[in-house]
Structure formats: structure tokens, C-alpha cells
Image (cartoon, grey):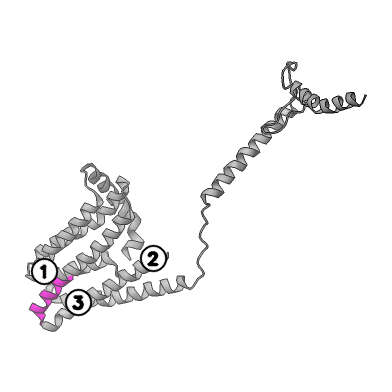
Amino acid sequence: MFDARFRTAVDRVVSPAGRALMRTGLAPDHLTALGILLSVPTAWAVATGHLVLAIVLYVGSALPDLFDGSLAKASGRTSRRGAFFDSVGDRISDTVVLAGFAWYAQDRFGAHAALVPLAVLGVSQLVSYIRAKGDALGINAKGGLMERGERVFVLCFALKFPADMLWLLWLVFALSCLTAAQRFVKVWRQAGKPPAPLPVEPTAVVLRWRAWREERAGRDARWARSARRPSSRPAADGFFTGPKRPGGPTSYGRWHERRMARRQRPAQEGARRRD
């Protein structure tokens, strides 16, 4: 929900940070890897009950995911490999952190309470999978009430108020299920429509033929203009005195007269012999 409504405003805020990070020489993949590494001490802090430290580390692990996109745009390093690494890194971070939540819930609320964070983990992976599958089919599957940004926000509240942690986790689970249903319906409706025809790229042979045709059309146009244009100087006495079309025969000149003379020579010699 935040990504769909406030993405433009967030991009305006984080764009200066991306340009500042570009001067440090960091790559977007470095920030993604930093977020994954910070998720490990975050899970440890949650599992051991150091919840204030867990909040700081959790926010610290989520910030690189916010700035890696702006850094990639500012440095011109956007790539499919970076998008793939960023998506996989988010799934790894969610798994590690929610495992820490499951450990803490088991210690404080009982063994069965650990199933709630695991249920949140499962449905959050489903939400991400629907979007990834939609993108693979060329369908935009973004949107929903509980995306990753909202999930991090609510989980920070759960760490701030540990007595209400289970209720907040149930809220995340319910809204994540609703988000998965919203995305499923969105992809289902768009997939039912006939796909738009893809543009056909011309082959190398077609490109060479088009270039040859354009070159020949330009040559013919130049020859036609030169044939219609009257000459401002008298024709010189040479081999060719008439206009010549590139690639075509010459109609006048001494070369033409000599060729006609060679053709008439056998007939003249035969007439002399008969005489």
C-alpha cells in the first residue's frame, strides 16, 4: 500500500541519499548484502529478548533495501542481476528475522505460539511469489495492504509492545492473506486477456536489404536530377559525351562509335569478297 501511494514521494527523499552514496564507491549489491548480514544479529536480539536493540538492528537491516534502488538509479547500475539479488535478499532477511520471532514467542507465550510467526513467514513468501510469477508473465502484480514495508513497520511495533506481539502478528497474518488474495485476483484478471503481440525484430538479412534499397533509391534520385539538369558547359570531346547512369550503358561517344564499327566490319568484308 505504501509502495503504491507514496513511492514517488519516497523516491524524492531518498534520491539525494543515493547520489551521496555514489560518491563513496559503494555498489547497490553491497547495500543488499549489508541488509542480509544485519538480519542475523536482528534475529539473535529478538530471540534473546533484547527487543530495543532488535528494533535498532531491524530498522538498520531495512534501510539498505530502501537505498539500494536509489543508488542503482543514481550510478546507472540498474540490472536484472541486481533486481534478482535484491528480491532474494529480502526473502532471506524475512526468513531469518521471523525465525527469531518464533523463538521468542515460544519462550514467552508457549510452544504453540511459535506457529504464528511461521504462518506469517509462509504467507509473506506467498505474497512475494505471486508478484514474482506475475512479473515473469509480464503482468504487474504490485499492490496490497501488507507489503514488505508495512510488515516491517508492524513488526517493529510488536517489538516495542511485546505483550501484544501475538495480536500484532495475527494482524500481519490476516492482512498478508488479504494481500495475497488481492494480487491473485489482479494477476488472474490480467492473465485472462489476450496478450499484446510482441514486436518482430528484423533480421540481419532484412536490414541489409533495406539499406541496399534506400541506397539504390537515393542513387536513382540523384541520377534523375542530374539527367534533367541542363549542363552549363559544353560537352568535352572524350570517350563519353552523354549522361551516364550509374550501372547503366553509355549511349553516345567515341566508344559507342567504335563498337558499332566493329560490328559492321564483318558485313563489309563479306560484301567485298562477293564483289
> Taking 238 as reference, is 101 above or below it?
below
| Residue 103, quarter of the rendered image | bottom left
The mark nearer the N terminus, 2 or 3, is: 3
Say the numbered circle drawn on residue 118.
3
Say the numbered circle drawn on residue 136.
2
The mark nearer the N terminus, 1 or 3, is: 1
Q: Which element carries disc 1, helix, strand or loop? A: helix
Q: Residues within 10 Å of mark 1 (few under 14, many from 20)?
A: many
Residue 67 in the image: x percent, y percent?
A: 25, 53
| Disc 1/disc 2 C-alpha distance (Å) | 35 Å
- Whether residue 105 is in magenta: the answer is yes
Q: Quadrant of the C terminus?
A: top right
Task: Give the magenta range.
Answer: 98-110
Residue at (88%, 25%) from the top-left corner? 273
Say the numbered circle drawn on residue 2.
none
Q: Note whether residue 145 is visible.
A: no
Q: Which residue is mark 1?
A: 46
